[in-house]
């Protein structure tokens, strides 16, 4: 089992109030699955994504990634997990604005300690795989939205992560470009990558094989697509 | 290996940040530049002075004691000094008899007069009455020194300084000629070699006559200077003690009372000079330190702004795996690079100012290696110290909130 989550609970304290963002989530995801997490605002999908991506720790419950319990790790250990096991793709791309596409993609490799030549080689190849071989030395402001998201996808892939975590990846793109991006995810899935998509768009979620619907911090429905 | 990669990346980023907003960079660096420039500038001026001063001092001899009425560095009330008795030949004779340490003892007394030859004249020339004992390393270029016979027989002969000979005798040979010294005729027996200037004063405008003649013609109501040149410089302190003992006896100074004379030494000038320059150094370092402090606060301020501006970027880096120490290191290096650049500019300016000063004034300056290290060291230190807080603040940012920051 790639991801094993048991009775996950996350609470926030806002002054005197306690917000129950996640109210007991049980979830299993296998290697190679293509999963979509859906839900309205306040359903807890962002919180669940943050915990899945090791950006946050649960208040209670267990989260096992690749048979490693990551729910009780400290900051540094989680940073290491994020670097090696997680590939993020954000709605707003989140690229470094004053760096080239190549430098953006090699960033995770810098933090995992790879040599300069190895980094350049891997980053260049990954950019070619997403169709941006001829745009490596461009900065984000010289690229279209779709191209930026491809750079972000390349960055997410470069350390060969266990899961690709995409948060509304087409939210800032027009329909046609969005379709192109979804095709890339399709291709990645066929190559054996595990993809977790967080979205509120039904037609985006339908690209996946399994939709998990959240409401009020709980799983309402979890069914094959 | 990783550290060097990060270092080069950080240096590039820091440089880029500076170039992008030159006004901001300038304001940030101002404090550091002023601090380092001040320290370097003053240090190079002072080091130059030290060298020049030291050279002048050593040319004047460090194994010579001058027994005089007053000390060179006045640290006591004038009232106490005013009533001191003159030093006379009695003291000279006492020293000649009782000083056991081998030394050359020579009394001298001095006045100023006009010196004439035919139609040429030189005013305000130093006239000294002395004996034949040599206590300095100045030798005649032409002719000879005064001899014991000259002194004993009170001959009207003189030895003149280079400038005097040059001014009065444009075409003739001075030796053997008669000049008027303060109205009295003297025969020149020697011309001293050229000595040059000390602190802007020429040593070559003098006339030396036998001391007995001086007394007869110009009076004996002046205090003598007794020059004692000790053969072995290592015995100079013992010589001083002996001299004091002998003089106290002759002048009947009560036991426990202070000396009513002074035994002066070139080292005293050196000490005075050193205490002046150490005050100068302290002032420079004080000013420099305050400027560096201000500069450091400027750096801290600008780094805090930089951290805030790049909150999103920090969130991104953390999301893809940057650890706290990676972020901390990144911003710390930036801070150090900025301050080091300020330090280098300050060093350049400091030396530049030193060069300008040495070319438009008699003050000499030198460039010293250790002051460069001081400049770079201090500015980098400021960068580390004042960059620590912003860097750790950046490292502790929450990645989720940072990613949401607009």
Image (cartoon, rainbow, N blue to C red):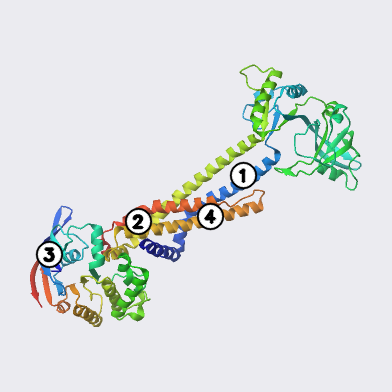
> Mark 2 — residue?
B391
Q: Residue at x 66, y 50 (%)?
A: B361
Same chain letter for marks 1 and 4:
yes
Which residue is more in the foreground, B221 or A57? A57
The quadrant where residue A197 appears: bottom left
Tell which subunit mark 1 falls on.
B
Residue B320's x, y, as percent? 27, 66
Which element is circle 4 on?
helix
CA gap, disc 1 to disc 3? 77 Å
Numbered-mark total: 4
CB contact under 8 Å: marks 3 and 2: no
CA gap, disc 4 to disc 2? 27 Å
Q: Residue at x 59, y 46 (%)?
A: B46
> Mark 4 — residue?
B347
> Mark 3 — residue?
A5
Same chain letter for marks 3 and 2:
no
Compared with residue A18, is residue B264 higher up or lower down, i.e. above or below?
A: above
> Mark 1 — residue?
B50
Q: Which quarter of the rendered picture does the N terminus of chain A lie within?
A: bottom left
Tell me which numbered mark, 1 or 2, is placed earlier along the sequence. Answer: 1
Which residue is more in the foreground, B135 or A28? B135
Which element is circle 3 on?
strand
Q: Which quarter of the rendered picture does the C terminus of chain A lie within?
A: bottom left
Tell which subunit mark 2 falls on.
B
Which element is circle 1 on?
helix
CA gap, disc 3 to disc 2? 35 Å
Residue B327's x, y, as percent? 33, 60
CA gap, disc 1 to disc 2? 43 Å
CA gap, disc 1 to disc 4? 20 Å
Compared with residue B339, is residue A4 higher up or lower down, i.e. above or below?
A: below
């Amino acid at each position: 089992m790639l991801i094993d989550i048991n009775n996950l609970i996350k609470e926030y304290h806002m002054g005197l109030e306690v917000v129950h963002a996640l109210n007991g989530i049980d979830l299993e995801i296998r290697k190679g699955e293509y999963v979509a997490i859906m839900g309205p605002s306040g359903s807890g999908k962002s919180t669940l994504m943050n915990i899945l991506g090791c950006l946050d720790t649960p208040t209670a419950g267990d989260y096992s990634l690749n048979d490693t319990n990551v729910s009780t790790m400290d900051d540094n250990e989680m940073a290491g997990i994020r670097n090696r096991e997680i590939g993020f793709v954000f709605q707003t791309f989140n690229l470094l604005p004053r760096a080239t596409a190549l430098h953006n993609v090699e960033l995770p490799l810098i933090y995992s300690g790879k040599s300069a030549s190895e980094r350049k080689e891997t980053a260049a190849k990954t950019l070619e795989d997403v169709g941006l071989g001829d745009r490596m030395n461009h900065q984000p402001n010289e690229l279209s939205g779709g191209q930026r998201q491809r750079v972000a996808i390349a960055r997410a892939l470069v350390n060969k992560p266990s899961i690709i975590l995409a948060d509304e990846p087409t939210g800032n793109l027009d329909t046609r470009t969005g379709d192109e991006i979804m095709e890339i995810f399709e291709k990645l899935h066929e190559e054996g990558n595990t993809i977790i998509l967080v979205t509120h768009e039904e037609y985006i979620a339908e690209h996946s094989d399994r939709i998990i619907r959240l409401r009020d911090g709980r799983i309402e429905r979890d069914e094959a697509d | 290996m990783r550290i060097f990669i990060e270092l080069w990346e950080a240096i590039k980023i820091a440089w880029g940040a500076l170039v992008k907003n030159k006004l901001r960079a300038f304001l940030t660096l101002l404090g550091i530049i002023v601090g380092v420039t001040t320290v370097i500038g003053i240090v190079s001026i002072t080091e130059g002075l030290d060298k020049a001063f030291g050279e002048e001092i050593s040319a004047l001899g460090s194994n010579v004691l001058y027994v005089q009425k007053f000390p060179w560095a006045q640290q006591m009330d004038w009232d106490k000094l005013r009533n001191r008795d003159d030093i006379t030949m009695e003291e000279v004779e006492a020293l000649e008899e009782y000083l056991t340490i081998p030394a050359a003892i020579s009394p001298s007394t001095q006045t100023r007069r006009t010196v004439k030859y035919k139609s040429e004249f030189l005013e305000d020339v130093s006239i000294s009455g002395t004996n034949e004992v040599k206590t300095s390393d100045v030798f005649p270029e032409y002719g000879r020194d005064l001899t014991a016979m000259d002194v004993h027989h009170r001959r009207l002969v003189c030895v003149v300084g280079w400038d005097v000979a040059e001014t009065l005798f444009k075409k003739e040979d001075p030796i053997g000629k008669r000049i008027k010294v303060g109205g009295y005729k003297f025969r020149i027996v020697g011309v001293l070699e050229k000595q040059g200037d000390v602190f802007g004063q020429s040593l070559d405008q003098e006339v030396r006559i036998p001391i007995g003649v001086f007394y007869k013609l110009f009076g004996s109501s002046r205090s003598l200077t007794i020059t004692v040149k000790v053969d072995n410089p290592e015995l100079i302190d013992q010589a001083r003690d002996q001299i004091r003992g002998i003089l106290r006896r002759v002048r009947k100074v009560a036991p426990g009372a202070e000396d009513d004379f002074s035994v002066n030494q070139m080292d005293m000038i050196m000490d005075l000079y050193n205490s002046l320059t150490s005050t100068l150094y302290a002032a420079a370092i004080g000013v420099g330190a305050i400027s560096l402090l201000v500069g450091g606060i400027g750096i801290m301020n600008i780094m805090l702004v930089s951290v805030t501006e790049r909150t999103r970027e920090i969130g991104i880096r953390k999301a893809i795996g940057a650890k706290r120490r990676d972020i901390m290191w990144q911003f710390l290096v930036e801070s150090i690079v900025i301050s080091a650049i300020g330090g280098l500019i300050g060093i350049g300016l400091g030396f530049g100012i030193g060069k300008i000063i040495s070319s438009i004034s008699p003050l000499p300056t030198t460039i010293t290696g250790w002051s460069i290290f001081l400049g770079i060291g201090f500015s980098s230190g400021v960068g580390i110290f004042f960059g620590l807080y912003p860097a750790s603040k950046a490292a502790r940012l929450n990645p989720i909130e940072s990613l949401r920051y607009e």
